[in-house]
Image (cartoon, rainbow, N blue to C red):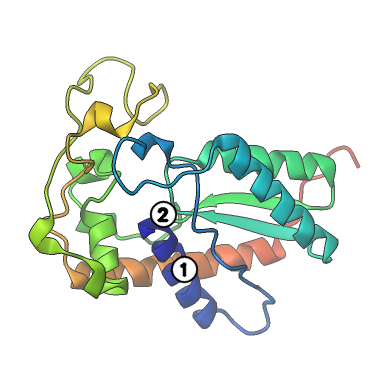
Amino acid sequence: AVDAAISVAVLGKALSQLDASIPAYALPCLDYGKSNEHWHFPGTITLSAQTLLAVLMDVAESVYRAGFRKLVFMNSHGGQPQIIEIAARDLHQKYEDFIVFPLFTWKVPKVPIELITPKELALGIHAGDAETSLLLSILPDQVKMDRAVAEYPLDEPRSGLLSMEGALPFAWTTRDLSKSGVLGDPLPATQEKGDRLLEALANGWVDVIKEVYTFRQPQAWH
């Protein structure tokens, strides 16, 4: 729900700022995704990897049949980028004139990372400072700061080549790393910080959409 709210808010703000000469359209948000890493915590509703892949393929093929030739998968959830990348590659392999972009909401330019501590940037991947600040900006009535707890991954290897996230990751579920389900520190979160993050993310997505509009697929084979 948090990731979906972030996607809707960021994209909505970006589209409101986009020049009207660029024909960009948003589909309704897909509120369910692959979240089985949180399976052990109450309230988790998840799709399997196979189901999510099938849904993405069906939706994208419907978009293609409607005449669109560029599609952005805007994803705010860290548990499913690989599935989205597989869908994008398979779609382009099937339809050579279909250009598909598997993009992560946070990986756009202009995000003010100086608002977040280095430790939080490295380890705050779920319900931490950035997400909580954004929700204080987007849906302040839904955030219960009196219940906020900070917890960083327990027993994660602190040295060596393998890590929770990175070039050489190991598979994990949230309960392997956290008793509360939190992976980060939401306590410093503020609405002002969230407002700045939302503005920066929206501006970054305006730039991304502009570039998607003008992008041409490389065709070395042609």
Say left or right for 206 vs 189: right
Query: Residue 132, how many percent across, how many down?
Result: 24, 59
- Residue at point 49%, 75% (across, down): 12
Report helix, strand or loop for mark 1.
helix
The residue lying furthest to the bottom in this view is 20
Q: Which mark is residue 8?
A: 1
Callout 1: 10 Å neighbours few (<14), some, many (20+)? some
Q: Residue at x 63, y 57 (%)?
A: 72
Three-letter residue code for mark 2: Trp
Which residue is located at x 20 percent, y 32 percent?
153
Q: Which image quarter holds the C terminus? A: top right
Q: Which mark is residue 106?
A: 2
Q: Residue at x 84, y 47 (%)?
A: 95
Between residue 36 and residue 13, name the one nearer to us: 36
Which is more N-terminal, label 1 or label 2? 1
> Quadrant location of the N terminus?
bottom left
- Residue 116 is left or right of residue 20, and the answer is left
Question: Residue 108: where, in percent of width, then height?
Answer: 46, 56
Q: Marks 2/1: CA distance?
A: 13 Å
